[in-house]
Image: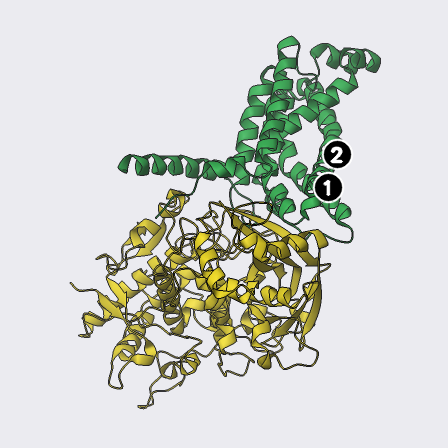
Amino acid sequence: MAPRMRKDVWKLPADDKTLFWYGQAIKTLQAKPITDVTSWWSLAAMHGIDPQLWIDLGYLDPAVPLPFPADPSQPGFWNQCQHGSWYFLPWHRAYLGAFEAILLDTIVKLNGPSDWALPYWNYDPERRGNLRFPQPFAPRLLDDGSQNPLWVKERYGRRGDGVITVTPQDVPLSQLWEAPEFFDEPNGIPTSFGGTQTAFHHDAGAGAGQLEQVPHGPIHNLVGGSIRNADPSVAANNGLMSMFETAAIDPIFWLHHANIDRLWESWLKVARAPSDPADAFQNPDNTDWLDQPAGAFAMPAPDGSTFNTTARQVLNTQDPSLNYVYQELTVPDRPSHPLAARLRTLGMAPSDADRTSENFGMPSSKTTELVGEYGGSVRVAGAAVDARVQLDPAARDKLAASLSHKSMMGLGPEGAPKPPDRVYLALENITSATDAGVFHVYINLPDGADPKDFPNNFAGVVSLFGARAASKAGGPHAGNGLAQTLDITAIVDALHLRGALDHLDIKFIPQTPMSQQDKVDVGRVRVYRQSRGP
Amino acid sequence: MTSRSRLAVLTRGHAPLLAAASLAGWVFLLTLDRHSQVPICLSQTSLDALANGALAIALSIEPPALVLLSFMAMVLAMMSPLLARPLAHLRLRSLTSRRRRAAALFVASYLAVWMAAGLILLAASVTLRLSSGVIGLSAPIISLAIAAAWQASPWRQRALNRCHHLPALAAFGAPDRDCARFGLVHGLWCVLTCAPLMLLPLSEPGFHLPLMAVVAAALFLERMEPGRRPAWTIRILPGRTAAATMVRSIYSRVRHAEAH
């Protein structure tokens, strides 16, 4: 059977029934009790469930005995979602695959199309119209006055008023194509696409890869958001999409994650350049990732049985067990020698830049070195907060040397042509009392300037999705909080050219309401240089 | 898909130094063991002397310096492998010129906590062995019971979770203070997590080294597991999940290699 096509929700024709059948299946699955592994409720609980919270929100009947342990800190069949880990992408693919198979089975039984596939919300920052919240999910009632199955009450949006807005800066994608490696080894700063090599664990931690960090996190929080009211429970004030324990109850969750899965497929299509590492833009062949010796992914089947699967078994989306393709992949045009453009930016003559970039060999090692830091933690609240990162003169000189033509052309002390360092802003020990929060980060923004006028100073976006659990000192994550790494290479190149690489003034600009009570702290702000060598 | 060298992980950062420190600890204890009993487990003669209040005799049989030295060797042998993660954290958060100094400060303060704990552990093991006759249970059985009760408790899990804490460290300003404090705090949680298990080899001189090896392996494996919510548990065997994972991981690798 030909693979089914997961379609772009913005490209569905006016008379298309994909979302109609999605709604019909939701109604059927929501009518099933949570004790049924194919019910909407059990499917959502697999991602995460906090029974008391679900009861408070009206999504769980306290009288029903639960079929599985439901303690969020004890992962089992429920509370299984993988975040802050290299298992994030394969686990969610297996999860979406099992979900889609159950919906397809339901739709076929309702006499719907046998080629139905989950659509995706393509919030492409280059296409402004795509950043709107998909309209069919917004109204509470349908035209006939019945309840819209695609609607949930707890979507509080950016400002807590239920208005969902996403800007291009909330969901940048360019950093994904600058992260050639799938995973980071433990103890590094996370710069990879797919996450840090970790054990199989529920809850977030410091090991989220670039795709999990952005656009995954901000979309969760900009849809879910939180409301400000008198309820002392942070969780009860959060929107469904803002928490692991409730996110998958919201029907938009599945379209969001289909897009994340699509971006993974897109990344695999990026062409490897000669100066990229050997495993660039490829999935790991590490058996600890492929076969998950720490525990396979447990999934439900349409007949109510359960089965185990692994990353290895979900790598090919056209395998009969998954059987889908995407209507469109987002693959950037990449020159055969992508570093040539950067060398030109760094002031090298075009002919020299082309020739030099061709001389860079395949790197087999990378070294990461601390260049500077802000000497304290930063409480992010109010309109904006500033922090000045001091650079260590010796480390800064090494960074500047790597950006010099001499070093790049192989005329330096090391002899061989050496690609210029990449530079990262590492935000570590990000702790928070809430999960619902997004802030933007700018570098050297002039005083009083409107950030919109300075896109070149934009370093990135940070979301607090998963921060609450990761902030508990005695908890499983030891209070280490989240970590996020922003690629600031282009900004540093520009500063270097202006001779202004002395310190970096970082500005944190909350995009969602953040008060002192939310205790959003960035424990450390550091700058690293990363060099690759033969 | 292409491979990354797995050997690289073993030769990077502090791993070779930690392996050497652990090995040195084992060699020292093995050498002592061949000549006499490991001094940290006081001999029966010393114990009898202590029981009779003849401290001077006990001290002459087991010189305090040698007792402390052998305890330090025990800590180095068992705990060095557990320090790879905090030291890697420290390394990446220190300026290159300060990396060695930072590691040295961390290790020195970590060891200081263990040496202080050693005095308490030594006193505890002596008390256990002296009182075992009175209670009617052998010292290893009592220490096993203490370790098992501690393993089952939420407090131990809380301490173990805190062993995974990687604090914010200053690179400028007062980096020495932060490194030393990291070593002290990490050492404290490490002692709380591991010390009751360390009583086991200390209370059975005849099997000191084999018991030490078993406990060291279990603690090493346990440190590889993700944290859990603190709660009473009957799953008290440390490292059993990581051991099972490791076996499956090796099996999977071998099968994968055969397929190619």
Q: Quadrant of the N terminus of chain A?
A: bottom left
* Residue B175 % position (x, y): 75, 49
Figure chain in yellow: A
* Residue A379 % position (x, y): 69, 67
Colour of the chain lettered B: green
Report the front residue among B164 and A34: B164
Colour scheme of the rendered structure: by chain
The reply to whether callout 1 and callout 2 are in contact (CB within 8 Å) is yes
Distance (Cα) linking label 1 and label 2: 8 Å
Report the front residue among B145 and A131: A131
Q: Earlier in the sequence, mark 1 or mark 2?
A: 2
The answer to whether A322 appears left or right of B212 in the picture is: left
* Residue A141 % position (x, y): 37, 87
Q: Chain of mark 2?
A: B
Q: Chain of mark 1?
A: B
**What residue is pinned by disc 2?**
B112
Is residue B240 shown to the viewer in this render?
Answer: yes
Is residue B238 shown to the viewer in this render?
Answer: no
Q: Residues within 10 Å of mark 2 (few under 14, many from 20)?
A: some
Q: Mark on residue B184?
A: 1
Question: What's the amino acid at mark 1?
Answer: Leu
The answer to whether A342 appears left or right of B116 in the picture is: left
